[in-house]
Amino acid sequence: MAKIPINIATGSLQQNEVIVGIDLGTTNSLIAIIHPESKKPVALKEHDGNALVPSVIYFGKNGNILVGDEAKPYLTLEPQNTIFSVKRLMGKSYNDIRDHASFFTYKIIDDNTESLVKIQVGETFYSPIELSSFILKELKNRAEHILKMPVQKAVITVPAYFNDAQRQATRAAGKLAGLDVLRIINEPTAASLAYGLGLKPEESKTVAVYDLGGGTFDISILRIVNGVFEVLATHGDTYLGGDDFDRAIMQYWMQQLGITENDLAQNKEQAQSLRLLAEKAKKHLSVSGVFQETINGKELTISRERFESLISDAVNKTLECCSAALSDAGLRVEDIDEVIMVGGSSRVPLVKERVKSFFKKELNDSLNPDEVVALGAAVQADILAGNNKDFLLLDVIPLSLGIETMGGLMDVLIPRNSKIPAKASRQYTTQKDGQPGMKIAIYQGERDLVQHNRKLAEFILKGIPAMPAGLPKVEISFLINADGILTVKAKELRSGVEQSIEVKPQYGLTDEEVEKMLMESLLHAREDIAKRALIEAATEAEQLSDTAEKFIQKNKELLSEEEVAQTKKAIENVRIALAGTDKDKIQLAIEELNRITQPFAERVMNEAVRSVLQGKKL
Ligand code: ADP
Ligand code: MG
């Protein structure tokens, strides 16, 4: 029955699980959580202080698989056995990627069809889902190692433009990695959450999220109203990113050294070290004016000015995408309230400068741009865990929903924090013989007695054909649609009689009221549990004594005089116990009556009586 785990001793919410946020990136992936003490999102880091796991998988000779930094060197050394950019293949068929097939240095099976792509490594075929699951498994292991506890639940981010197939594939990869994927959220939404945007109920803002990663550029325009994120427009270039900056530096040096593409193709080690050095130079130039290093006796240098002139066109291309996104959204630059910088490549000073002057606005760039998506996913995870009480997402239900059962007890059908849309159903039966109708009262709240909860609606299911008590099967189902509207349906399954009602659960409840109701359920948890136990025992006692009484009247000729006398005595005892409030006494009397009636009840019980004894009643 418990809806939220409560520690009875301390009266506090029990927290024995963690929900992680995961940025499953094209170039790098990482995992973040809300720090249990600071309550701030943090990226999980190994001792070396590095949170990023390169999204690279290497398949070694004897079946060993390396993921991340260890796999990276094999990109140039054994390209056919080393998978990168698998995110680009998620939910795609060969026909989808045909134009870019040469980009991939590993083997993608060309089956000339619309079915999902397969990748061949050695003798084995892998789907992008399986490959992504290797990365997710690595992240999961890492997190478990750092946190020293099992990690099972996660929120995973995807680009805003991902279609349903790509989202499903991402979810499947999570499942394959042993993760319960609570939600897939958009990367720009996550980045906004990391900056605290969308967390205040009455806030409305228009946000531009500029995301320049390793191989992709995305610009998303979001509208945030009352904690709901709407993607107004997305634009970008799926083959433009930091890798192009590295390549520009490499080509510059190749010219200086007089090395051709052909030379590099011959000498993989040289290509590898030049590529790595170019990336190092690029990162260095984000914080200083010149880069200089000697390899093999040759001096390689590049100034920031030179670098900026090399990448200027690429940066301008991203701004053209920004213009296009704005125009798709029907907005002007002045309509943007916030600009958020995402992706490792947004650290490049020229990028920041140009974006700032394009939007004519200060940038949100205080968080690590390559961590910000994972940080926001952790914020979302925390909200789903119900820890962030200041903020109630519209797409989870804030309070449990249920109906009143006998004795005024709350029977929860949909527990609080359930994702919407949601549905649940349960069967009930009647209390009296020939009962023609059944009252269905719908409540919202965490307390065990409906009188302490909030009544949302009530209706009567009419026209149940005459049947003995306990025989009708009334199925009550709750359905909450994506707009948070609850429809309650009651249907008598034997006759097909049904009726339904529409309720808006959140209507008229402020966040403070919701919070107050939750607090009260915590404060009264102990007494509520005791009260519920008493009511449940009393309800059972009443039913049982009535049934037993009816039973001996009906079946007198089948019972011995002694059996009848014993039963009457036991019924009497149950009724005496019922007059008091001692739950244990009631329980004992019930057990005694059960013990006496069981042997002959079994003997003569028919279907109807069995239902009476077992059915749950309204
Ligand atoms: P993705 O979202 O594509 O997985 P990231 O956001 O992790 O990728 O961005 C990776 C890119 O960021 C790489 O090209 C990397 O070289 C680049 N990058 C990381 N740090 C810096 C830096 N300090 N200066 C410039 N580029 C950087
Ligand atoms: Mg990214």
Image (cartoon, rainbow, N blue to C red):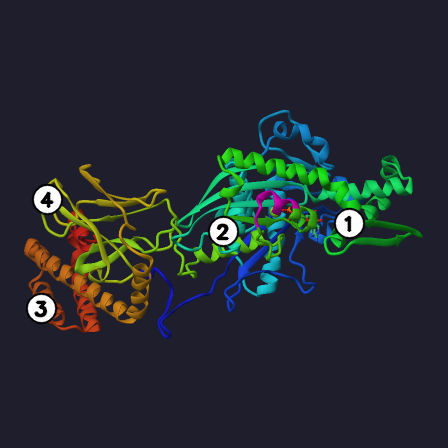
Task: Please name the residue that numbered disc 2 is placed on.
Answer: 180
Task: Please name the residue that numbered disc 3 is placed on.
Answer: 572
Q: Nearer the viewer, mark 3 or mark 4?
A: 4
> Is residue 96 left or right of 310 when viewed as pictured?
left
Callout 4 crowding tier (Cα within 10 Å): few <14, some 14–19, many ≥20: some
Task: Please name the residue that numbered disc 4 is placed on.
Answer: 436
Kind of residue at disc 1? Arg
- What secondary structure characterizes most of the magenta part? helix
Q: Find residue 54 and report its horizontal and vertical position in percent.
A: 68, 50
Find the distance from the CA under tag 3 to the CA under tag 4.
30 Å
Kind of residue at disc 2? Asp
Q: Residue at x 50, y 65 (%)?
A: 39
Kind of residue at disc 4? Pro
Among the two numbered marks 2 and 3 on one chain, the one whose residue lies closer to the N terminus:
2
Q: Is mark 4 within 8 Å of ligand 2?
A: no
Find the distance from the CA under tag 1 to the CA under tag 2.
45 Å
The answer to the question of whether label 3 and label 4 lie on touching residues, with beta carbons closer than 8 A, is no
Q: Find residue 107 and report its horizontal and vertical position in percent.
A: 71, 35
Q: Nearer the viewer, mark 1 or mark 2?
A: 1
Magenta part of the chain? 354-361
Find the distance from the CA under tag 4 to the CA under tag 1.
84 Å
Among the two numbered marks 1 and 2 on one chain, the one whose residue lies closer to the N terminus:
2
Q: Is mark 2 within 8 Å of ligand 2?
A: no
Find the distance from the CA under tag 4 to the CA under tag 2.
45 Å
Among the two numbered marks 4 and 2 on one chain, the one whose residue lies closer to the N terminus:
2
Say if residue 25 shows up in the picture. no
Find the distance from the CA under tag 2 to the CA under tag 3.
53 Å
